Image (tube, grey):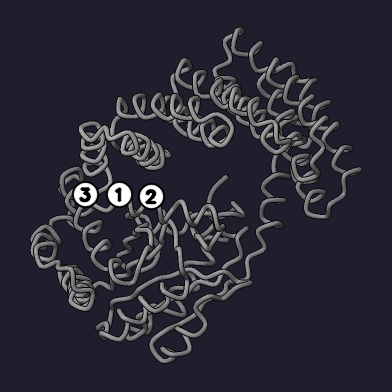
Amino acid sequence: MSNEHNPIALLVSKIQQTWNSEISPHQDINLVRWIIKPEQSKLYEGFLKLESTPHGNIPDMLLVLLTPFSSIEHHSKQIISEWAKAYREYQATTNQSDEKKNTSNWDVDAFEQQLTDNSDSNNQLLVKMITSFQNSLPENRPFTLALFPYTVEDTKAYSKWLHSILKQGIPPNNRLMIFDHANERYFDYLCDKYEISSRSLAVPLDLEGAVSKLANSGDPNDPEIQFRQCILKMSKCVKNKNMTELQKWGEKGLLITQKTGIKSMYSTAHIIYAAMLFNFKEFELVDTLLMKGLALAKQGLKAGDDVCKSLIIQYYGFQASSKQLQKKYEEATNLFCKQADTANEIGYPQQSLNAWWMAYSSIKKLDKERYKLIVEKAYKNGIKLDKDTLKSTSMGFIAADYYNILDGTKESDTCLEINQFMFDLEGENWKADVETQRKALEKKKFSISGWF
C-alpha cells in the first residue's frame, strides 16, 4: 500500500502539514508544544523518526534528545553532554553527505569544554549551542531541538527549567519542541507566559478510524485480515469493559487462526486474547490460554517456525506477570528466570536482562539471598553484551542494584569496576539518572517515554 493510500501515513502527513502551516511561516516562534493523547503517541513517534531522516517534510533540521530530567540545576549540562556525544557518533558513522559536509566544521567540543557546575552559565551555554548549530546549517535552515525526556520526575521543575532557557532569548529560526498530555496540560502556564513566541498544536487525528481502515484493507476472506478485525473488536471490548463480547471475539480469533494450520498464528491468537483478559483479572482463563499457547509455540519451533522463538519468550513473561498479579511471587520469579534463560538460549540476550530484573524485583522482599544471586547473574551476563545493545535494556537498574549490594558488604574494588563500566556506558551521572528513573516508575509520574 502506497503512502498516498495508507491511512496511518496520511495521519503523519497531517501532522507535517500542521507544522508547515502553523510554524514554518513564523521565524520568531521558538517554543512548539504538541498537545496529544497517549493513544496518538505512536503517530508522533513516526513523525519524529521520519523528520530525523532526509525524507522528512518539514523544513527544519530536527534533533531529538531523550535526556532524563532530574533537576533544574543539572539538566542543561546533561543535554549539552548528550548532544555532544551524539554529534560525535553521528560524524564518525555517517557517510560524507552534503549535509554533513555543511556542518562538519561545527566545533561541538568547544561547548562541552565550557561546561561548569553553574546552572545559569550552562543555561546560557545551551542557547549559544543551539544558535551556533543553526548558524552552521546551509541556507539559514531552521533548527528544532525536540526535547523528549525519558523521564520527568517533577513537571513543575521541568517547566521552570524550560522557562530558564526561554528567558535567555532564543534567536529566530531556532525552536524547542515539547509534548504535553491532552488531559493534564502540564505546560499551560509556561505557554501563556510566552504567548507571543510559543504555539500549541492539537491535531485532530482519527487514529481508530485509520487503524480500522488498515485492518480491513485486503481480501476479506484472508484469515490474517479476519484475525486483525477480531483484534480490533477485542480492543473495543476492553475499552467498553464488555467481558462477554471480548470472549466472543477472542474465541472467534482462535477458531480463525486454528483453521490456518499455522502454529505461530494460532499461538499468537492465544497470547493476544490472554493479554486482553488481563484487564478483567480473569486469571484462570488467562493461565489456561497461556499454557495452551505456549505448547503451540513450542510445537511450531520444533517444526522450524522461527516466529515461535519470540513467542516463547513472550509467553514466559506473560505467565510470570499473571502470577505476579495473583501475588504468587515465587512462581512469578521462577517464570521470569525461565524467560531470561530461554531468551539467552534462543539468541535474544538483551531480553534476558529485563526478565532477570523483573525476577529479582519480584522476590526481593521474600528471599534476600535469591535476590542477590539473580542480580549478580543479571549483571555478569549484561557486561558481556555490546554497549549499543545495553542502552535499550534495564542494565542501569541492574548495575545500580548490584553496586548497592556490594557496597553494603564493603566490596569496594568490584564497586569501582561497576562504576567504571556504567560511566563508560551512560556517563558520570549514571547512578543519579537510574534513581530518577526508579522514582518515576515507583510513583508513576509523568513520562513521555511511557507513551512511546
Q: Amino acid at mark 3?
A: Tyr
SS type, badge 3: helix
Viewer-nearest residue: 359 or 125 = 359
Instruction: Give the quarter of the image for residue 305.
Output: top right
Q: Please state which amino acid type lies under the numbered disc 1.
A: Trp
- Vertical arrangement, residue 384 with respect to residue 442, above or below: above
What residue sits right under mark 2 in the picture? 434
Residue 341 left/right relative to 59: right
Residue 271 in which image quadrant: top right
163 sits to left or right of 94: right
Cβ–Cβ under 8 Å for marks 2 and 3: no
Q: At x 66% / y 35%, what residue is drawn?
A: 324
Tell me which corner region of the image, top left, top right, bottom left or bottom right, holds residue 385: top left
Judging from the image, what secondary structure is the residue with disc 2 in? helix
Nearer to us of marks 2 and 3 is 2
Q: Are marks 3 and 1 in contact (CB under 8 Å)?
A: no
Task: Where is residue 375? Give x, y as percent.
Answer: 42, 30
Contact, mark 2 vs mark 1 (Cβ under 8 Å): yes
> 218 or 99, which is in the foreground?
99
Image vertical order of residue 264 relative to residue 70, above or below: above
Give the residue pinned by disc 1: 430
Q: Nearer the viewer, residue 268 or 401?
A: 401
Which residue position holds label 3?
Answer: 90
Q: Count neighbours of disc 3 (C-alpha within 10 A) and say few if under 14, some if 14 to 19, many if 20 or more.
A: few
**Residue at 59% across, 13% down:** 301
Q: Seen in the image, is 109 located left or right of residue 64? A: left
Residue 320: % across, % down = 64, 29
Q: What residue is drawn where x is 72% and y is 50%?
A: 212
Q: Secondary structure at mark 1?
A: helix
Q: Earlier in the sequence, mark 2 or mark 3?
A: 3
How far apart are labels 2 and 3 at the CA level? 25 Å
